Amino acid sequence: MDIKNKLYSNQGIHLITSIFTIENGVVKVLLIKRKKEPYKDTWALVGGALYNNEELLIGANREIYEKTGIKNISIYEFKTFSRVDRSPIMRMIAVGYIGVIDLERVRVLKETEKTIAADWFPIDKIPKLGYDYEEILIEAIKAFKIKIIDSDILKELFPNDFTLPELHKVYETILERKIDRRNFRKKLLMSNLIIDTKKEKRFEGKKPAKLYRFNSKSSLSKNVF
Amino acid sequence: MDIKNKLYSNQGIHLITSIFTIENGVVKVLLIKRKKEPYKDTWALVGGALYNNEELLIGANREIYEKTGIKNISIYEFKTFSRVDRSPIMRMIAVGYIGVIDLERVRVLKETEKTIAADWFPIDKIPKLGYDYEEILIEAIKAFKIKIIDSDILKELFPNDFTLPELHKVYETILERKIDRRNFRKKLLMSNLIIDTKKEKRFEGKKPAKLYRFNSKSSLSKNVF
DNA sequence: TCAAAAGTGTTCGTCTTACACCCATGA
DNA sequence: TCATGGGTGTAAGACGAACACTTTTGA
C-alpha cells in the first residue's frame, strides 16, 4: 500500500459517543461546543479523532475525558458512519459509541481546553448539531433502547441503592412505553441482576419502598425486556 | 483539526469481509493471496483499504469485486478492529463484514490484478493468515452464527428451490448443534420466510422431498432459532 | 421386503402478558 | 380517614423443547 496514494491519503477516524442520562424523568444526552473550527459554536456529540498510538475504545474514552472531564465510563460501539462529506476538513469516518452516566456522581466540565460549553439536552429537544451528529444520535438512541434490554448498562445510573419503582420509571422513560409493574418486579427479582439490601426508603405520605442494588457479579442470561 | 499533526496523520481504514459458503456439508470461508507486500504469499481475508470517495459499505463491495470477481453480495458490518500494530505499513483500523454466497452461482476468480490465489477453507482448517485476520475471522464466525438466527442471510445460499432437509443441514452445520427436525419444519413453515412451490425433488430410493423457496417479500419478526 | 430419508402431532414446561386489590405512610 | 404510591398472585395464551411412528421410493 502506497501511503502517498491520493486514493487513500488524509483519512481519519472520529470516535463519537452519545452519553445518556436521566434527569427528572427525561432522557438527556450530553452535548458540547467546541472551542475551535470546524463547527465552532455549534452543539456537538462528545468525541474527536483517533490518535495513532491508541485503540478505538481507548481513544473514545480519552476524547470523553478531554472534552467533559468524565472518567471511567463504560461505552459500547454500535455502528460506523461514513458519508463522504461528513467532515468539511478531510475524509473522516466515525465509529459510534453509547454510554450512560449518573448525573449525581459525575461532574461534567462546562469548559475545557477544547470546549466552551457542555450541557444535557432532552433527546426530543436537540439543537442543530455539527457534522452528521443528528444522524448518529438517532441511531444511538435506537442502540440505547436495545442495550438496556440485553445488557445491564443501566447499572451506571444506579451506583447505589435504588427502589424498583425508580428503575421501573427509567425503563419506561427510555423505551417510551408502559411496562406492567408486577411483571417488571417479577422479572427483575427473578434475575440475578439485583440484590435486596433489606433496607427501605421512606417517602412522605407513602408506603416505604424496598431498596435494591445491582449485583456486581451478575451476568445476563436473557433479555431484561 | 490539523491534518499534518503527527498524532493523526497517515491513518487508513481496512474493509475486511469474511465470505462464507457451505460445500459438502462444511462451512467454508473464502481466502485470497495478495500479489504484493505486505503479506505477499500469505492467505488473507478478502478486503483492502477504503478510498476517499466512497462509503464503507461501497468500499467493502469494491474490494470484494476487485479481489474475487464477486458482485452483488449482501454484507453486514459486525465489529471494528483497531490494534495499534495490526498493519505493518501504517496505522490502519479495520471494519469487519460478513457475507454469504452460493458456490453454484458465483465464480470466484483464482487470480486478479491484485491476487494470485483464492480458495475456500473449512473454518476449522484455516491456514496462517496475515494481519489480525485470525482474530477477525473468529469474531466473524460468531457474528455469522447470530446472523443466521436473526436475519434471512441464508437466502443467499438458496437462490432457487430447496428442500427443508437441505436447509436444516445447513443450519445444523453452521450452528454446530442438532436441531429437532419437526421443530425446525414447524418454525420455518409458520414463518413467512419460505414459500411452498408445490413441487417435489425426487431422490433415488427415498421419499421425495417438497421444494420450497425463500419469500422475497418476507420480513423477520422474530428469531429463526 | 428392505433400507433410507421425508413427513408429521402431541405433550409438557416455561415464559409472557394481562389484570385488581390491599398496605403503609404522613397529612 | 384519605390520598399517594408500593407491594403482591393468578390465569390464559404463546412459545420452545422433547419425543416416535408412518410414508414413499428404488433397489
Image (tube, coloured by chain):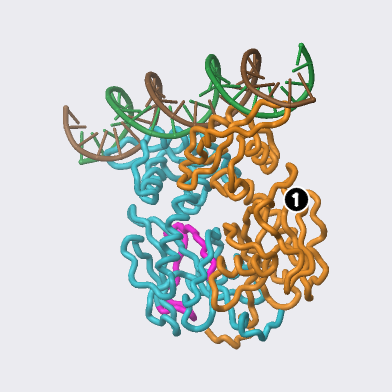
Chain colours: A orange, B cyan, C brown, D green
Task: Check if residue A218 falls in the magenta segment.
Answer: no
- Which span of residues is magenta-colored? B94-116
The residue singled out by tag 1 in the image is A123
Q: Position of residue A165 (x, y in %)?
A: 64, 34
Task: Establish if B170 lies above or below A162.
Answer: below
Along the line of sight, the residue nearer the viewer: B19 or A203: A203
Q: Residue at x 66, y 49 (%)?
A: A142
Label 1 packing within 10 angstroms: few (<14), some (14-19), many (20+): some
Q: Position of residue A88 (x, y in %)?
A: 76, 74
Q: Position of residue B56 (x, y in %)?
A: 61, 67
Task: Establish if A191 lies above or below A33.
Answer: above
Q: Is residue A221 visible?
A: yes
Along the horizontal axis of the image, is A176 left or right of A148? Answer: right
Q: What element does badge 1 sit on?
A: loop
Q: Position of residue B85 (x, y in %)?
A: 47, 77
Q: How many marks?
A: 1
Q: Residue at x 60, y 86 (%)?
A: A5
Along the horizontal axis of the image, is B64 left or right of B169? Answer: right
**Magenta span dominant secondary structure:** loop
Q: Quadrant of residue A43?
A: bottom right
User: Label 1 amino acid?
Assistant: Ile
Task: Establish if D8 lies above or below B148.
Answer: above
Along the line of sight, the residue nearer the viewer: B153 or A16: A16
Along the line of sight, the residue nearer the viewer: A210 or B203: A210
